[in-house]
Amino acid sequence: MIGLFDSGVGGLTVLKKFIHRAPGASFVYLGDTARTPYGNKGANTIEKYAIENTRFLLERGATSIVIACNSVSAVALDALRKTYPEIPFFDVITPATELVAADTSIKKIGIIGTRATVGSGVYQDLIHQTRPDAQVVAAACPLLVPLAEEGWQGRPETQRIVRRYLKPMRDAQIDALILGCTHYPLLLKEIRSGVHKRVKIIDSPRAVYEKIAASHPELFSQKENPSQQFFFTDCSEHTARIAQTWIGRGIRCELAELEF
Ligand code: DGL
């Protein structure tokens, strides 16, 4: 069974794609809403949280882990693989970079993400490995995660903040934009209108699904009564409402009692 985790509701953008493509697959999701955001924290803290989250998912029956968080994928993937060498881990960075690198019409690539993700340089390095000629413009957008967690879509304040963050992307006349944070699809409308119409916005959750489904189709095997569980380390009404709105149906949000 697949286990997915994120610092909060952001990973649900990946899970939503999984549910759409494989509605009968079993999964267990953990949103670490008690400790969100991760993206402004140091690598040691993010690694510690990632290991604790993984342990929780494994105890709940997960047999492979989707790191539905770019910040964790960027800074803690090696630590996770070292701690749990027998468990397959899937990150959310590689699939989007492969997609972009394969499209030679894309010459200038914009990346937005958290401080941890952008500062790690992982996106930039992966793209340059196959496309050394590509121009990469990256910007950390630390205010976007709280705005998404708050459900502040459609507000003029949010639009203004997003526009300001995207200024370097407009100045550089990027061809494609990678949303390097799983929270950002929640602000897709604002992001879309902050860049030129011709900019391709990379559908990262789709790239993640397709990469995993191609190599591990058994993880998406369909059952009539799949086990689909949603856990949050802080399970307020607000979190439950945002999670349900995003998944698009009533879901039972359970409290994850992690020992911090
Ligand atoms: N959604 C996460 C990511 O993809 C985490 C954002 C955060 O907690 O700062 O990076």
Image (cartoon, rainbow, N blue to C red):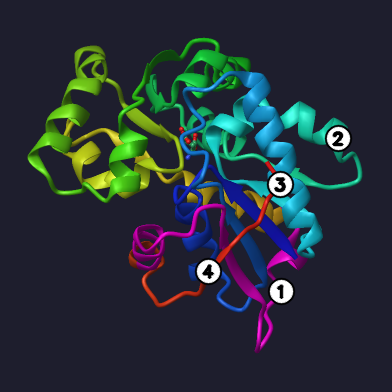
The earlier-in-sequence mark between 1 and 3 is 1
Disc 4 versus disc 2: distance between alpha carbons? 29 Å
Cα gap from disc 2 to disc 1, whole angstroms: 27 Å
**Rendered view: 20 above or below 202:** below
Tag 1, which secondary structure? loop
Mark 3, residue position = 259
- What type is the residue that disc 3 sits on? Glu
Residue 195, can we see it?
Answer: no
Q: Does the CB distance between marks 3 and 4 fall below 8 Å?
A: no
Question: Disc 1 versus disc 4: distance between alpha carbons?
Answer: 12 Å
Q: Left of 154 or right of it: where is 254?
A: right
Residue 203 vertical position relative to residue 133 in the rendered view, above or below: below
Q: In the rendered image, which residue does mark 4 sit on?
A: 19
For discs 2 and 1, the disc positioned in front in the rendered view: 2
Which residue is rendered at x = 46% and y = 34% of the image?
A: 37
Residue 148 point in image, percent of width and height: 32, 44
Label 2 neighbourhood size at 10 Å, few (<14), some (14-19), many (20+)? Answer: few
- Estimate the x, y position of residue 245 in percent, counting from the top left: 33, 66
Image quadrant holding the C terminus, namely: top right
